[in-house]
């Protein structure tokens, strides 16, 4: 460890610059300009609207109270904005950025960075590396960078955009708006709340890109991609969800897929205008697939997976189940299995269609 300077500011507007050693700089009061230079520096802004620059080395920057600007520079740095509306720039290296309280702006830069918004409606931007981003509390705006990023919205009504990499996006609690991005393999989870999710997988994969979408709890609106394959998952108490833009045989690929964590005898199919309604019997959970009956372009395959096994129903076989079930009323709330009376009417059709060509049970 190279011995460095200890620089202490005043209550005025100070300009303090370190040298080549491992410097410690205190700005205290005033709107200060503090620069570490080369070396592993520790810089404290204190009160006031300060500018902190780490320079070359493994630096630690604390903004303190006030609306501060922190720039890590070269090296693996730690930046903490603390109180105030702060702007944090990671620079090159694997950096950790924590906005602290209030409305902050965080930009990752090069390297595999970790960004934490903290309290407030923050804006977080990924950089060139594989970044981890967490908006924290507040209505945050998060945009993934060029790498394979992991993005968490946290509490609040967040807006999240994926980008070129293979991203994992989790909106968390709140009514979020999530965009999958244009990577080859994307995963988007809505979490709790009434979310809107756009599947926007890249156009350069000839239909073989995959976007996995799980709206989570709440009444979600899921917009599919017309180019790549969407896999929509519905688990547990998922709510009343709507799918717009499901695709039957996008170019070069297979159909979109709707997956449920129940036995196939627990799904109820019904036509409602141009939409297909798929309900989990005995519950209030339902998926409405818009424009299913407008040609075949809005159709998808259906699958289930539970402790009883996995089963598959091709899109072409769905309408036969709709016709068979149209003569009956669905089971009442709380009845989560088909009684023998239902099976006497539907059993042969259910078992044959879920095991027909293009579908199967295991």
Image: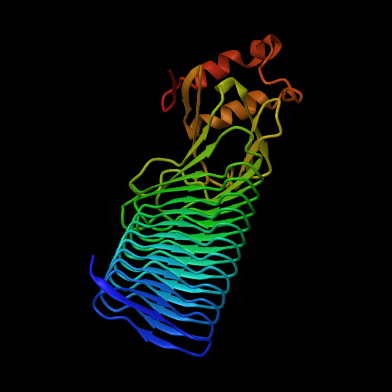
Can residue 226 be seen here? The reply is no
What residue is at 60 percent from the left and 69 percent from the top?
A: 102
- The image quadrant that residue 156 belongs to is bottom right
Q: Is residue 168 above or below residue 340?
A: below
The answer to whether residue 346 of the structure is visible from this angle is yes
Up-down: is 142 above or below 52?
Answer: above
Please name whichever residue, 265 or 319, is drawn nearer the observer in this view of the structure: 265
Q: Nearer the viewer, residue 56 or 106?
A: 56
What colour scheme was applied to this rendering of the protein?
Answer: rainbow
Where's residue 160, x and y in %?
Answer: 51, 60
Q: Residue at 58% x, 66% y: name it.
A: 101
The structure residue drawn at horizontal position 56% and vertical position 25%, both measured from the top left corner, is 262
Asked if residue 67 lies left or right of residue 286, the reply is left
Give the total of numbered labels: 0
The residue nearer to you, when weighing 286 against 20, is 20
* Quadrant (top left, top right, bottom left, bottom right) of the N terminus: bottom left
- Residue at 63 percent across and 17 percent down: it is 346
Task: Give left or right: position of 190 versus 312.
Answer: right
Quadrant in which the C terminus is drawn: top left
Q: Is residue 320 above or below residue 309?
A: below
Task: Tell me where residue 88 appears, x and y as whole percent.
Answer: 44, 72
Nearer to us in this view, 149 or 211: 149
Q: Quarter-wise, where is residue 240 in the image?
A: top right
Residue 16 horizontal/vertical position (percent): 38, 85
Left or right placement of residue 270 versus residue 57 in this view: right
Q: Position of residue 342 (x, y in %)?
A: 68, 15
């Amino acid at each position: 460890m190279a011995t460095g300077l200890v620089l202490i500011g005043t209550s005025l507007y100070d300009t303090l610059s370190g040298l080549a050693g491992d410097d410690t700089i205190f700005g205290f009061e005033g709107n200060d300009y503090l620069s570490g230079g080369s070396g592993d520096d520790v810089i404290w802004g204190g009160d006031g609207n300060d500018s902190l620059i780490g320079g070359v080395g493994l630096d630690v920057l604390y903004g303190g109270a006030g609306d501060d600007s922190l720039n890590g520079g070269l090296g693996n740095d730690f930046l903490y904005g603390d109180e105030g509306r702060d702007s944090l720039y990671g620079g090159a290296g694997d950096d950790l950025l924590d906005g602290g309280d209030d409305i902050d702006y965080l930009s990752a830069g090069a390297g595999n960075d970790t960004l934490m918004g903290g309290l407030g409606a923050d804006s977080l931007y990924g950089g060139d590396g594989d970044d981890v981003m967490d908006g924290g509390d507040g209505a945050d705006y998060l945009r993934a960078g060029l790498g394979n990023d992991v993005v968490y919205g946290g509490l609040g009504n967040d807006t999240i955009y994926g980008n070129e990499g293979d991203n994992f996006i989790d909106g968390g609690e709140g009514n979020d708006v999530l965009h999958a991005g244009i990577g080859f393999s994307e995963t988007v989870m809505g979490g709790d709340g009434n979310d809107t999710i756009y599947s926007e997988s890249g156009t350069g994969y000839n239909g073989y890109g995959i976007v996995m979408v799980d709206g989570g709890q709440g009444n979600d609106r899921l917009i599919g991609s017309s180019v790549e394959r969407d896999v929509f998952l519905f688990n547990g108490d998922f709510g009343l969800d709507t799918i717009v833009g499901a695709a039957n045989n996008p170019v070069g690929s297979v159909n979109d897929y709707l997956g449920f964590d129940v036995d196939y005898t627990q799904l109820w199919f019904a036509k409602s205008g141009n939409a297909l309604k798929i309900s989990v019997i005995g519950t209030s959970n339902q998926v409405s697939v818009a424009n299913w009956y407008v040609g075949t372009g809005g159709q998808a395959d259906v699958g289930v997976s539970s402790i009883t096994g996995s089963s598959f129903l091709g899109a072409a076989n769905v309408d036969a189940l709709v016709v068979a079930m149209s003569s009956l009323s669905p089971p009442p709330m709380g009845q989560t299995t088909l009684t023998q009376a239902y099976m006497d009417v539907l059993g042969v059709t259910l078992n044959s269609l879920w095991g027909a060509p293009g579908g199967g049970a295991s």
